[in-house]
Amino acid sequence: MDKLEIKGAWNELKGKIKQAYADLTDDDLKYEEGKDDEMLGKLQQKTGKTRDELVKWINGL
């Protein structure tokens, strides 16, 4: 299982994610240190992707 690696500024990454998934809200993308799994769970529900797919996609942004 891959680990989520936040590279650069989270606000920049959040903007790219919102461009790809316009129905995501700021609450869906609220990032807090140590709460990666909670945020990824919300994203899984909204996007239909697996945790590993999301981690690889976000790490590649």
Image (spheres, rainbow, N blue to C red):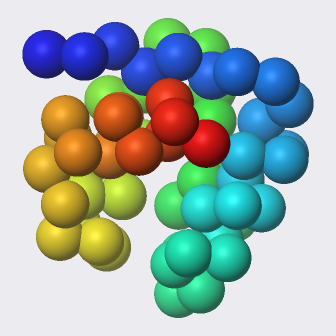
The answer to whether one can see residue 60 in this image is yes
Q: Measured along the vertical axis of the image, is residue 39 above or below residue 3?
A: below
Horizontal arrangement in the rendering, residue 41 relative to residue 48 (left or right): right
Q: Residue furthest bottom?
A: 23
Q: Position of residue 25 (x, y in %)?
A: 62, 73
Q: In terms of depth relative to the viewer, which is nearer, 32 or 15?
A: 15
Report the residue at 34% width, 13% height from top: 3
Q: In which quarter of the view is residue 16 placed? A: bottom right
- The quarter of the picture where the C terminus appears is top right
Q: Position of residue 4 (x, y in %)?
A: 43, 21
Horizontal arrangement in the rendering, residue 22 relative to residue 51 (left or right): right
Q: Measured along the vertical axis of the image, is residue 17 above or below residue 53?
A: below
- The quarter of the picture where the N terminus appears is top left
Q: Residue furthest front?
A: 60
Q: In terms of depth relative to the viewer, which is nearer, 17 or 46?
A: 17
Q: Measured along the vertical axis of the image, is residue 43 above or below residue 41?
A: below
Number of numbered discs on residues: 0
Report the residue at 29% width, 71% height from top: 47
Horizontal arrangement in the rendering, residue 55 relative to residue 52 (left or right): right
Q: In terms of depth relative to the viewer, which is nearer, 56 or 22?
A: 56
The answer to whether one can see residue 27 in this image is no
Report the residue at 82% width, 24% height from top: 8
Q: Position of residue 57 (x, y in %)?
A: 41, 45
Q: Position of residue 41 (x, y in %)?
A: 27, 47
Q: In terms of depth relative to the viewer, which is nearer, 60 or 48?
A: 60
